[in-house]
Image (tube, coloured by chain):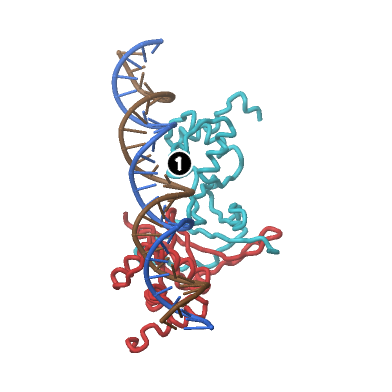
Chain colours: A cyan, B red, C blue, D brown
Amino acid sequence: MDNSVRPYGQVYETLRKVGLRPTRQRLGLARLLFENGDRHVTAEQLHNEAAAANLRVSLATIYNTLNQFTESGLMRELVVEPGRSYFDTNTSDHHHFFHEDTARLQDIPSDAISVGKVPDPPAGTKVERVDIIVRIKKTTG
Amino acid sequence: MDNSVRPYGQVYETLRKVGLRPTRQRLGLARLLFENGDRHVTAEQLHNEAAAANLRVSLATIYNTLNQFTESGLMRELVVEPGRSYFDTNTSDHHHFFHEDTARLQDIPSDAISVGKVPDPPAGTKVERVDIIVRIKKTTG
DNA sequence: TGTCTTTTTTAAAATCATTCTAATCTATTG
DNA sequence: CAATAGATTAGAATGATTTTAAAAAAGACA
């Protein structure tokens, strides 16, 4: 667990694997994203985190990076609310709770929810992905 | 089926029922929305349709109206793509196919899809709504 | 290592959907 | 029909995201 020795080792490999140059910004963002469990972040949130971690990255780079990570399959984009996108570090098959009060996402493991029957997609099309969002609110107004 | 006699009769009642003044713009938009089967429109699309139907309505009013219709339960808002919202005239329990190539939505009747098991919402929260989006793409690139 | 080439990063401007503002108009009520 | 409350509008403002063009950093290689 001593990650002072090869602080960027893990994510360095991850970036190489998908063919992205391991630059200072990408390495730093990748650590924030991938070394802290499953995460759901907006660009703005990640930008703030980066600042808090003393990583100087412009907002444009945050967007570039999130989009590149998404295109290379390291993350996926979630659209739950009008106005902004969330990016999810968990790319395996699963779904989400969305807390409407706090605008937070929470994973639902795929075995905790089951889509019994899915209708056949219209002729000439194939299913790309199924997204289930369970919108929840605090009880007691 | 002669709707030249009481052209606004149906939607007039609908508006009254939810407590919205039956103005020219709201009546016109309501007709476009509710007298053409189940629909999924963006603000921009509806604006164009209105123009095509010789109904002069500003884009601000389109937004106001879609939001009011949604708040009064005549429609619901769907967020499927980053950037823009869709509004659905079908407020009953159902889900959607989203054609990624054409950016069109298509209803999935609720009995054509079944959510077998839904996990209990976290303590202190209750389920507000469950959205299922089946994203589809043309086969043969 | 230094130089060349390519890719990244960046600040700032541009874009796009949506909301706000404040002024004008329209429905409703008496 | 006048008064007033509510609606519509053009245009400005906002906020998230993308683009632009220039400067900086990375990779290749002599």
Question: Residue B46, can we see it?
Answer: no
Q: Quadrant of residue B89?
A: bottom left
Can residue A80 be seen at all in this image of the molecule? yes
Residue at point 46%, 70% (across, down): B108
Above or below B63: residue B8: below
Horizontally, residue A70 falls left or right of residue B56, namely: right
Quadrant for the C terminus of chain A in the image: bottom right
How many numbered callouts?
1
Q: Residue at x 44, y 81 (%)?
A: B12
**Which residue has dot 1 on it?**
A63
Relative image position of residue A119 (x, y in whole percent): 46, 68
Using the image, name the chain to which the residue with label 1 belongs.
A
* A20 or A125, nearer to the observer: A20
At 59% from the left and 32% from the top, the residue drawn is A53
Instruction: Please report the residue visible at 39 percent of the width from the left and 79 percent of the height from the top.
Output: B35
Kindly identify the amino acid type of the residue bearing the numbered disc 1.
Tyr
- Could you say which is closer to the camera, residue A94 or residue B79? B79
Asked if A48 appears above or below D28 in the picture, the reply is below
